[in-house]
Image (spheres, rainbow, N blue to C red):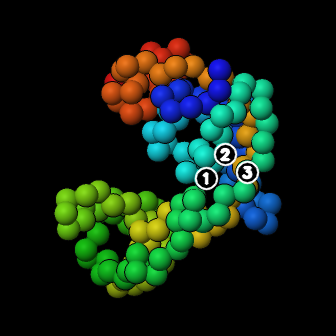
Amino acid sequence: MNIAERCVVAIDYTLKTADGSLIDTSEGDEPLHYLHGGGQIVPGLESALLGKAVGDKLSVVVKPEDGYGLHRGDRVLTVPRSSLPEGEEPEVGMQLEAVGRRGEHIVLWVKEVHAETVVLDGNHPLAGETLHFDVEVKAIREATEEELTHGHAHGPDGHHHH
């Protein structure tokens, strides 16, 4: 079986930046299970995996526009500390959730903390980065109807309780 839409795929992976810094790995842990075509991994990696089979190993370089996007300056804003949730003491690297103008949920990362203000960044922390993946395909199976309805993999055997 080869990787295609509507498949659940298990991969072992290592992700590094262009300078070789380790970002994430499945080494020593369970493989990552995802629904191919479900938008659960970056588009550049998903495209590279299409058609691959169990046992295939590949190194994939994903440009920012096919990963977490380009870094956009208009997504960085300075807000008064008083606009943060009450009792929330901001720290650099902290993740906050906000609601946008259209009711959408927005994830923001604290970049700087000052006496009266906080700098928040709506870009993903890896926006603008070229990503280097080393991947091995460990398993492929057809997705269950429940997984297709839910839009994500439920694990190695397709069973998962919400």
Image marks 1 and 2: residues in contact by CB distance under 8 Å? yes
| In the displayed structure image, the side of residue 8 where residue 86 appears, left or right | left
Indicate the quadrant where residue 76 lies: bottom left
Mark toward the start of the polypeptide (2 vs 3):
2
Q: Residue shown at 44%/72% (left/top)?
A: 121
Residue identified by numbered label 1: 44
Q: Residue shown at 39%/33% (left/top)?
A: 151
What is the three-letter code of the residue carrying label 2?
A: Ala
- The answer to whether residue 76 is above or below residue 9 is below
Residue 8 rendering spot, x and y as whole percentages? 54, 26
- The answer to whether residue 162 is above or below residue 50 is above
Image marks 1 and 3: residues in contact by CB distance under 8 Å? yes
Residue identified by numbered label 2: 48
Find the distance from the CA under tag 2 to the CA under tag 3: 7 Å
Q: Quadrant of the N terminus?
A: top right
Residue 5 or residue 78, whichever sits in front? 5
Residue identified by numbered label 3: 60
Residue 46 rendering spot, x and y as whole percentages? 59, 44
| In the displayed structure image, the side of residue 120 where residue 80 appears, left or right | left
Residue 51 rendering spot, x and y as whole percentages? 66, 34
Q: Quadrant of the C terminus?
A: top left
Query: Dot 1 surroundings within 10 Å: few (below 14), some, or many (20 or more)?
Result: some
Find the distance from the CA under tag 1 to the CA under tag 2: 6 Å
Image marks 2 and 3: residues in contact by CB distance under 8 Å? yes
Residue 91 in view here:
no
Query: Dot 2 surroundings within 10 Å: few (below 14), some, or many (20 or more)?
Result: some
